[in-house]
Amino acid sequence: TDLRALDVKLRLEGRTLKDLHKVTGIVLPDTPPYSIAGRLRREGESFVFDPFNGRIGDSDIAGAVTYSRGAKRPLFKADLRSKLLDFDDLGPLVGAPPKTGAGETASPEQRAKAQQMKASTRVLPRTPFITEKWDDMDADVKLVASRVQRPKQLPIDSLSTHLVLKDGVMRLEPLTFGVAGGKVVSRVTIDSRASPPLGDIRAEVEGLQLAKLFPTLKSMEDAFGKMYGSADLKGRGASIGELLATSNGTMVMTASGGRVSDLLTQLLEIDVAKAAMLLGTTKQQVDLRCAVGTFNVKDGVAATESFIVDTSETLVKVEGKIDLDEERLDLETRGRGKSPSALTLRTPVVLQGSFKKLSVHPKPGPLTAQMVVAGALAVVNPALAIVPFLDPGKKQDADCDKLIAEARRKGAMRPTKVASAGTR
């Protein structure tokens, strides 16, 4: 058949775009079920699908696609846009299935995979990249999503990315999320020519507004602070989980302003009492002056180099590690009060467990000795039993400006001055 005069209207529907590889030879991602329609025509040595529109999963999609047969390998170019992108539909791109609850669109295979992940103790995706097909063609894909449909607790506003696949090397340069009035900009490279694939992940967190970071938390509505950070990691592996499990590099974060107890309840999914315990205080709500943390990552284990949380009541030092391979935290916090009127917990507190299930409890060693003293004091007066666990404050404020400046030098893009804790 002579395709030089090809110019037709075409509708495509299926379980996943990945299946089109069998018919077209084009390497496409594993997506939720799709339905798209547009004009397909031949222009010289290229096939052009322009314009087209439709839906992939629960997201609208439109744009233009060109497929050209080059001398070395074919080139797939796409300029895509979405008015409302369902965040769940991005899951398969990193090896995670889309959501499968009521009203969600997913294939039977993706629903089965979602059930497996739900039953798994792991959080990070371990589904391998299909890298053996990356050398079949080159690609240049741009995607802009004006709005992102997401769960209420996830404040992502927009998305844009530029994906380039050339000679078996995939680059996202960059992948940008609009988040909580700021943005997260990532540059990711995965080289499939190495075995296992070599990954390079660089990310910058720029000015996330704490008031918008937790939109479901009313007590954070007046928080003025912002969060900054960076990550620079290199690893080897055939999936996101494996890349992080073998990674080496650094992670830096800074934050200031807001109710730190509420921040911890949202980030760690623990109750306010346990959040107060981590901060070494008896108060359930304290203001955050600043939090500055630096982690050195070696062979998938992120160890604290320096991690200080300065609140209105306590100065907290955090030590320990995060194992990205085992997906476990083992951190210890030690808070010290700032004034004699502020009674704080004397016992170090441990935050440990899997990414899916964390526990917070006093460190066993010091607690045992204090229990003995508490028992003796209780004989004299029951009200005195709590004394061994409390510390009359005597610490000063941390030099937040100095700590943040140092974090900025290490990669956390952040103004060198920090305002006092409080509200607008």
Image (cartoon, grey):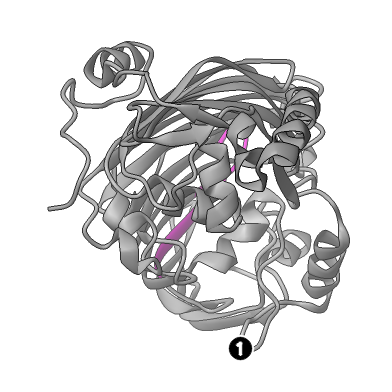
Task: Classify residue 405 as left or right of residue 340.
Answer: left
Task: Classify residue 407 as left or right of residue 122.
Answer: left
Give the magenta range: 62-76
- Determine the image quadrant of residue 33: bottom right
Residue shown at 32%/63% (left/top)?
A: 219
Give the answer, above or below, for where 33 lies relative to 116: below
Residue shown at 29%/21% (left/top)?
A: 397
Residue shown at 46%/66% (left/top)?
A: 153
Residue shown at 40%/69% (left/top)?
A: 216
At mark 1, the secondary structure is loop
Task: Classify residue 373 as left or right of residue 49.
Answer: right
State the image coordinates of residue 370 (x, y, percent, origin top left): 72, 27
Residue lying farthest to the front in this orientation: 380
Dominant secondary structure, magenta: strand
Give the answer, above or below, for where 367 lies relative to 180: above
Q: Amino acid at mark 1?
A: Gly
Q: Nearer the viewer, residue 192 or 314?
A: 314
Q: Is residue 150 visible?
A: yes
- Residue named by callout 1: 103
Q: Nearer the viewer, residue 372 or 406?
A: 372
Residue lying farthest to the bottom in this orientation: 103
Task: Classify residue 133 as left or right of residue 289.
Answer: right
Q: Nearer the viewer, residue 113 or 421?
A: 421
State the image coordinates of residue 266 (x, y, percent, origin top left): 51, 56
Q: Quadrant of the N terminus?
A: bottom right
Residue 408 within the magenta-colored segment of the rendering: no
Number of numbered tags placed on the structure image: 1
Residue 75 within the magenta-colored segment of the rendering: yes
State the image coordinates of residue 270 (x, y, percent, origin top left): 61, 55
- Determine the image quadrant of residue 195: top right
- Determine the image quadrant of residue 237: top right
Q: Is residue 124 visible?
A: no
